[in-house]
Amino acid sequence: MRLPDRVTGLFLVGLGAAAAYGGWQLPPVPGQPVGPNVFPLVIGTGLALCGLAIAFGIGHSFEEEEELIPVEGGQPQPPTGKLYGLRALLPPALLLFYVAMADRLGFIITAGLIVYATATALGARWKLALPLAVLAPIGIHLIFSKLLRVPLPAGLLPMPW
Amino acid sequence: MLKTLIDAFALISTWEVIIAMFAASVYGLVIGSLPGLSATMATALLVPVTFYLSPIAAIATIVAASSMAIFSGDIPGALLRIPGTPASAAYADEAYAMTRKGEAELALGAGVWFSAVGGIAGTLSLMILAPPLAEIALSFSTFEYFWLALLGLMCATLVARSSPVKAIAGMFLGLLVSCIGIENPGGVPRFTFGITDLFGGIEPIPALVGVFAVAQVMRAMLTPEPPPIPRRKFGSIMAGQWMLTLKYHWQMTRGNIVGIIIGVLPGAGADMAAWVSYAISKRFSKEPEKFGTGHVEGLVEAGASNNASIASGWVPSLLFGIPGDTIAAIAIGVLYMKGLNPGPTLFTEKASSMYAIYLMFIIANIIMIPLGIVMIRLASYVLRAPRAAVMPVIMLCCAVGSFAIGNNMFGVVTVATFGIIGYVMEANGYPVAAMVLGIVMGTMIEQSFVTSLIKSDGSVLPFFERPIAAILAAMAIGALVWPVLVWIWRRIKPAATAAASSR
């Protein structure tokens, strides 16, 4: 996901300009010189200026490339394909899946699915992923629902406690 | 004084506090030792649990978990050359070189011993520095608070190990996030786009969990698993540490002092302290040629430094509500939640609670020695936990924890969103810590800024009229202009040297 500085910089310019414009549109507090509109205006302007500077490469020379620590014994090269980079989007997608389904399916089932998917994506065999998908949600449910009294959705499979 | 101390003892000698502290210590040791799970992440995932504890027990868990995690990051650094937390990255090579020379016990022992010493030194600085600073802070008006908060943000951008322009952009992004909601001077919905859930604004804690935990799981999806640790038997871990203390007492003291200073600086935390101290140690060592070949000197200094910064990072947090680092930013959130609102009056009105915090820091750093030794001995087992088993559990904790903060599914959406934001920022060299501090401090900056503007009737001059405000203003503006000046300077310099140094 390494994008050129020009892209991220210009994105920030757009975001900053939008923020400044949005702030400017806010209604002022009657009878006062400053209200909720000032801060976004300042921030938006600042952000847009930073974005411009980044797009033009100012400050780039300060960046230190992150050094990758080589591991001894050689490591398997990760497969590189077009879709491989999209794997990174799996965790947030699973969290959104939780938001969408937890109330209907209940915590235990949704959490089990999330655990199984994450573990498999990280290379676990079913021998590890399956017990984990059963035990981890129950453990978390025990801690958060029983001990800390977080109202986790019961759904289709309510726990006996 | 004595009565406050006794009160403080009474506050912490309850079963709840003792159990919470012990459990959080074990938790911090385990999370800190697993590569990729940082001390900040350990603390952030702990916050939902602190909701259900008494104020002192809640702070006890934060104190214990963060101190332990910073030490325990040294363990995989020494055994695998993979730092467990960013704070150990500075000297992971050195420690690993010692392990290869067969001195793993000495390296790990130095980690635990000098971490404990550093932590106690940091606590002493907190005890000594905070009360007099509180006296000064009592006379601060919104002008001073505005500049102080701005200075804090600027420090965070200066010390980031990346482009200062990107760091400032990250900070502005964080401030922009803090604009969302109706908690603004006019009480109007701002940047809510008609979404009711956004009216309350973005909570800092889910944002933090997203940026530090979800983004880490996302990165794990694309990076190969670290190699398993070879099983090994350890000899005596503490043997020789007293000798090292005597031999390198000056390096240790210097590490403590540097760590304390960096901790007090808002925004700069343990990882910065370790990098700076390791560099200082190498620069002033009598035998710099030994560095990198398994020499314990840098380990002593940097280990003493990063733990000292953890405790001293609480100084600006407790006094001004300005976090010394990302861990302190979480602590501030917990303090507010527990009715211990940061500010100079905390030291007069809730003096016994403050003493309780000092005591907990000292206790945490003392029990770090036995628990740390146990952890080192068990490390071969803990580090065997496959990543495919740890990360799914982290995911569940993210989902449940962010839900628990407001019993609201929107928290989970926030975590997922900030996971993506954090991942993209990190991949492109934008420091996420700057954004986090922006989110945490945004409301405070806006309030002091707008209140000051109203007081001054829209004029900018009063921002510079009070003496302390003027000094703080000069420092903050200096920090802002600095990257520009350096950039111009590099442009003016003769083209030949510029070409040689830039690429």
Image: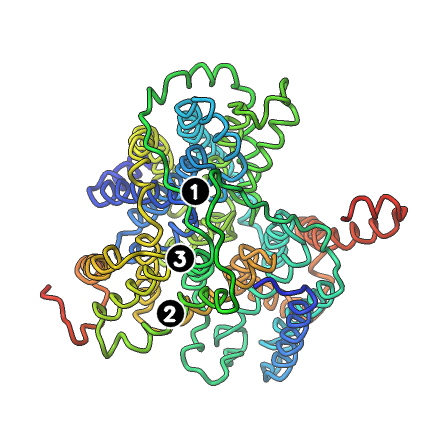
- Which chain hosts label 1? B
Viewer-nearest of discs 1 and 3: 1
Query: Residue beneath label 3, please?
Result: B336
Q: Which residue is mark 1?
A: B84
Task: Check disc 2 and report the residue beneath it.
Answer: B411
Residue at image coords 60%, 55%: B153
**Which quarter of the rendered picture does the N terminus of chain B lie within?**
top left
At label 2, counting other C-alpha atoms closer than 10 Å, the crowd grade (few under 14, some 14-19, many 20 or more) is: many
Residue furthest out toward the right = B494
Q: Chain of mark 2?
A: B
Which badge, 2 or 3, is on the more N-terminal residue?
Answer: 3
Q: How is the image coloured?
A: rainbow
Q: Nearer the viewer, mark 2 or mark 1?
A: 1
Residue at point 50%, 28% (across, down):
B97
The residues tagged by marks 1 and 3 sit, at their Cα atoms, a distance apart of: 30 Å
The number of discs equals: 3
What x and y, as percent, mark residue A141? 20, 61
Residue B278 as seen in the image, left or right of residue B120: right
Is disc 1 in contact with disc 3, using a CB cutoff of under 8 Å? no
- The location of residue B98, given as percent across then percent down, is 48, 25
